[in-house]
Amino acid sequence: MSQSRLFFALWPPSQIRQQLAAAGAALSLSAPARAVRADRFHLTICFIGELPVDSVARVRRIGRELRASAFAISLDAYEYWPKPQVVVAAARLVAPELQGLSDDLHLALAAEGFDLCVKRLRPHVTLAQRVAADPQLPTFTAFAWIARDFCLVQSPLGADQGGYTVVDTCPLLDKADDA
């Protein structure tokens, strides 16, 4: 049976992608480090993992049925994570709405019988991979974006197999729509 690797993520709009690309370009990295392409920038909110392809419709429905409000997320620091060897643009504070959205997705998926490995939410966008040594990081210029939707994303199985595919985009509600 064919498998698909899925996750829910915030998919930054083009203006935010440009700011992330500029933040990545400000890094002074040496080989084998490499910058992440702008079309791969995302902020994972719920990693699901490998599932049979016939499960995609169920996961898609879960995202579509979820009701949550739009919110601001602020990326405000570079961080180097040695174990995965990455440099990220991180949000040091987790917006309560972002945490709630992540929690709600995990709960809804668990209620549908999906077995997930739940980890603490560490909001970030990966800017560079294969960073073998702790780099000198410049000062990060903080910026924020308003998350107005979230996406179900399929990633290729196997390392460096190409880009991500947005399977579905699920709208978040304006605060006025919550009532």
Image: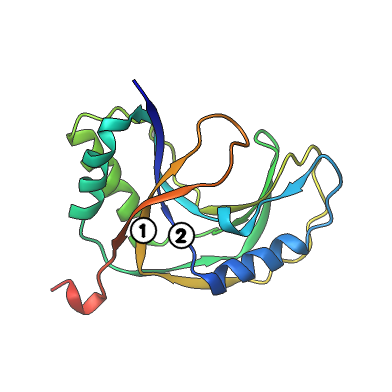
At horizontal 37% and vertical 54% (from top left) the residue drawn is 151
Q: Is residue 7 above or below residue 101?
A: above
* Mark 2 in CB contact with mark 1 (< 8 angstroms): yes
Q: Most extreme residue toward the left, as rendered?
A: 179
Query: How are the residues colored?
Result: rainbow
In this rendering, position of residue 128 left or right of residue 96? right
Q: Amino acid at mark 1?
A: Phe
What distance separates the C-alpha of mark 2 from that of mark 1? 7 Å
Quadrant of residue 132 within the rendered picture: top right
At horizontal 34% and vertical 29% (from top left) the residue drawn is 51
Q: Where's residue 145, x and y in %?
A: 48, 72
Q: Where's residue 155, x and y in %?
A: 48, 40
Q: Where's residue 104, x and y in %?
A: 26, 48
Of 98 and 149, the residue lying toward us: 149
Of 97 and 44, the residue lying toward us: 44
In this rendering, position of residue 18 left or right of residue 168? right
Element type where label 1 sits in the image = strand
At horizontal 20% and vertical 79% (from top left) the residue drawn is 176
Point out the image quarter for the N terminus.
top left
In this rendering, position of residue 38 left or right of residue 24? left
Q: Which residue is mark 2?
A: 11
Upstream in the sequence, badge 2 or badge 1? 2
Q: Amino acid at mark 2?
A: Trp
